Image: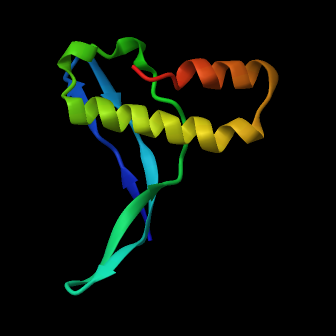
Amino acid sequence: MITSNEPGIYRPGRWGVRIENLLATVPAVADEFGEFLKFETLTLCPIDTRCIDRSMLRDDELSWLNEYHRQVRERLTPLVSGAALAWLQRSTQPM
């Protein structure tokens, strides 16, 4: 199953920001309580961090962003070269 994850904030008459990723539902673990699922991100595009005020992020939010960028960099690096690779490496640096 594919799900769209679209967190966002909108300021009526002013501006809005939305990040959209597609997620696949995949098996996670099975234990005495049953079988559990998790999400795997399908769309892999760096999030532009230039507009993020790092001081407003909780530790878990910063960890999520850095882990997401690590996955983007790891999975896309073999597919690009030259200027695209340089941009990808710059765009996915930990905050």
At x 61%, y 40%, the residue is 74
Seen in the picture, residue 41 relative to 57 is either above or below; the reply is below
31 relative to 26 in the view: left or right: left
Using residue 43 as the reference point, say whether residue 49 is left or right of it.
left
Q: Quadrant for residue 81, please give it.
A: top right
User: Quick check: 64 left or right of 25?
Assistant: left
Q: Pick the quarter of the image with the C terminus.
A: top left
The outermost residue toward the front is 32
Quarter of the figure with residue 19: top left
**Residue 61, position in %: x, y?**
26, 33
Q: Can residue 14 be spotted in the picture?
A: no
**Which of the 4 image quadrants contains residue 47?**
top left
Is 39 in front, or is 34? 34
Q: Residue at x 22, y 87 (%)?
A: 32
Of residues 34 and 52, which is closer to you in this image? 34
The location of residue 60, given as percent across then percent down, is 23, 36
Please provide percent x and percent y for residue 79.
Answer: 76, 40
Instruction: Tell whether 14 sits left or right of 21.
Output: left
> In which quadrant will I find the N terminus?
bottom left
Q: Position of residue 82 (x, y in %)?
A: 81, 21
Q: Residue at x 58, y 17 (%)?
A: 90
The image's colouring method is rainbow
Q: How many marks?
A: 0
Say if residue 45 shows up in the picture: yes
From the viewer's side, name the closer residue of 61 and 12: 61
